[in-house]
Image: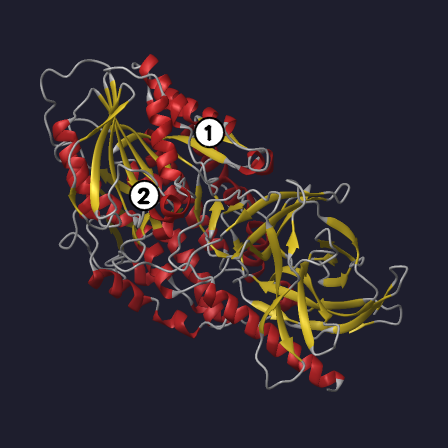
Amino acid sequence: MTTSQLVRRLRLFAAFVVSALALAACVTTVPGGYGTSSGQSLSDLVNSGLSIQAERGSEVLDIVRAKPGGTKPSGIKKDTWTVFVYICGSNLESQSGAATKDLNEMLRAKSNDNVRFVIETGGARVWRNNTMNSRKLGRYVIQNGRMTDAGSVAAASMGDAQTLTDFLTWGIKNYPADHMGLIFWDHGGGSITGICFDERNSNDSLSLRELDAALSTTFKSMWDKFEFVGFDACLMSTLETANVIASYSDYMIASQESEPGDGWEYTTFVKYLSQNPACTGVDLGKTICDSYLASQASNTKGFVTLAVVDLSKIDQLMQDFYRFSQEMYTSGNDQKTLAAMSRGIQKVSNYGCNNRREGFTNMVDLGGLVTACADIAPSSDEVLATLHDAVPYQIRGIYHADATGLSTYYPLNINTKQELATFQTVAVNPSYLSYVERLAYGATYNGGSQYQQYSGDSFYENNIWNWLLGNTTQEVQQEAEDHWDYVDNHTQESVELTFASAPQVDNEGTFWFQFDEAGINNAAVVSGIVYEMSEDGSDIIALGQTYDIYGDWETGQFSDGFDGYWLSLPDGQNLNLTVNSSTDEYIIYTSPIELNGTECFLRLRQSYADGSVEVEGAWPGVSENGAVGRSGIKIKRGDVIVPLYKAFSTDESVTASTYEGIPYTMTSNKLTIDYSYLPDGTYLYGFWIEDVYGDCYYTDVVQFFIDEKGTITF
């Protein structure tokens, strides 16, 4: 194979990898998701506790929330509590008994007659105890350290709004109390895929629309809001979730980040509530947050988050964010400003995972997003101040020190039309929705001047944007997807990154390039990608991504800063690295592995100061249903790790494949990652560039050599 053929083969392979990984890792919308076509009123189709209207050009949203419709039963004692817990066991229970563990934590707490937990269980193929029956929905009451069977009902999907409605209607009628709370227990997927993935029913989940429909129906028989609604699940502390829950609850308790497998710590929770029955939702929330943090293992403490959200402040936050979104959208009319905003948002804390290896949750810190656009949006200060007021308490590990308590959807990567259609139905205002669609439009139609042809007019009918929540219908979701049909043409390959000087190696052996003005205004992220040859020379193996780049966004000139160092297992096997996130102090990599025969991802955190590496553990990533796996799987003695790589043959007739490394068996409970020179040999290097729309461009690659002393020659 000639050098030119090899370059062509690599570029074709790079395009294949982007396409294949993006398709494999897409967050998909489960059947029954909710949507609306542009301009359609939902009032004749749905049942909701919330309506929002916005007149085009106005700086004010018209927000109307439901009021409870029931009468408080007589004889309810003051400062009594009923906490409803909706436990969808899923594979968390069937594989590791996580729900059983939390039920035992509730039972171990010293309780009293003033506090009871009313529980519904389902959604797991197998329960790791002798009480629950996976073929039925179980109902139980935990009080005074005892669990009583309250009767079971026929099996149904816990991802169905009606199942939740039936449980809450029954529970409130039979177990009313002065204060009531509600907890959702399971996987979470954030604003797009929701909560409670039922593994007995094709991982059907409760979307935010379905959640609203169930709570709206329940609210008609309630006499007051829930004191709190909590999510013992990943990624659910979002602005879109808070907007729904604010109609029915005083406080929300949820995590921006993925939760470790153990989730909340219930013994301290139940004990505190029993001893302090007059507490408020924020008082209880502080205890839940603190005990959650205290219960974490050392490898998970650094990145956990949990926030108490004062939902009485959400409507003001919605108003402030609406004005900010108008400024953001208007400023995005200018391509250079759009690029600057995109580059800033790319650096903002994001949660779950957002890379082409693990998948995209597209959950970005709300305060970080607003701060990234502060120079172009005068309303940013008001948003940040209200956001601060809306989050009276939160815990956050040192690696999420800038977390602001609420996330929002932002398309770091344009996934599927189903995802965008679902976002359309949960977006909190039309200007932000239009900003998101501008990115989708630019990605699909290759950006550049094309994006300026986009208009958000289609989201208005007679200059009014209508947003009503309620029961999900397949037809309405389909209409929303029809609006985004054009996204099917999205290739995820950027053609808008143009150069004044194409990538080249200069006389001093530096690999560099320079964008022209259009390239600067379309580019967002520049990184490098490194390949190595297999020992027999028949396969080219992708080692992955590096941020060792020198660059200047003013001039558009970038060059490699690669020093030849790489991360490897103790036996010397180089890991396949993808950058998950980075700050000024550290960078987090993800690396695909097999752990004891199961594919997952190793999380590694490297300090910029001294190059030291800490292993945060392993986690399963994002499922094809959009469920975010719980994080923090600890690596221990006896575990077998097999590194995985993408590889392709130098024979063009052979397709790309997964290349397996050599099994490495842990000899202690601490995995030590080596950071040293790559072995001497021949390698390949190219630039990997992402544009402002999330699309990718791979440059031609060049060979480089590392000698025995670690000297690199391009």
Q: Nearer the viewer, residue 55 or 249?
A: 249
Image quarter of residue 10: bottom right
Residue 654 seen from this side: yes
**Percent from the top left, x then y, of residue 332?**
50, 57
Residue 312 vs residue 221: left or right? right
Q: Nearer the viewer, mark 1 or mark 2?
A: 2
**Percent from the top left, x then y, of residue 56?**
31, 53
**Percent from the top left, x then y, of residue 657?**
57, 73
Residue 710 vs residue 98: left or right? right
Q: How is the image coloured?
A: secondary structure
Q: Secondary structure at mark 2?
A: loop
Above or below 74: residue 427: below
Residue depicted at 60% across the width and 76% down the height = 13
Q: Are marks 1 and 2 in contact (CB under 8 Å)?
A: no
- Label 1 is placed on what type of residue? Tyr
**Mark 2, other Cα within 10 Å: few <14 / some 14–19 / many ≥20:** many
Residue 428 seen from this side: no
**Mark 1, other Cα within 10 Å: few <14 / some 14–19 / many ≥20:** many
- Label 2 is placed on what type of residue? Trp
**Total marks placed:** 2
Q: Secondary structure at mark 1?
A: helix
Which label belongs to residue 127? 2
Question: Which callout, 1 or 2, points at the residue further toward the start of the chain?
Answer: 2
Above or below 501: residue 243: above
Q: CA distance from mark 1 to mark 2?
A: 24 Å
Which label belongs to residue 292? 1
**Percent from the top left, x then y, of residue 142?**
26, 26
Which label belongs to residue 702? none
Q: Nearer the viewer, residue 565 or 125?
A: 125
Residue 569 vs residue 247: left or right? right
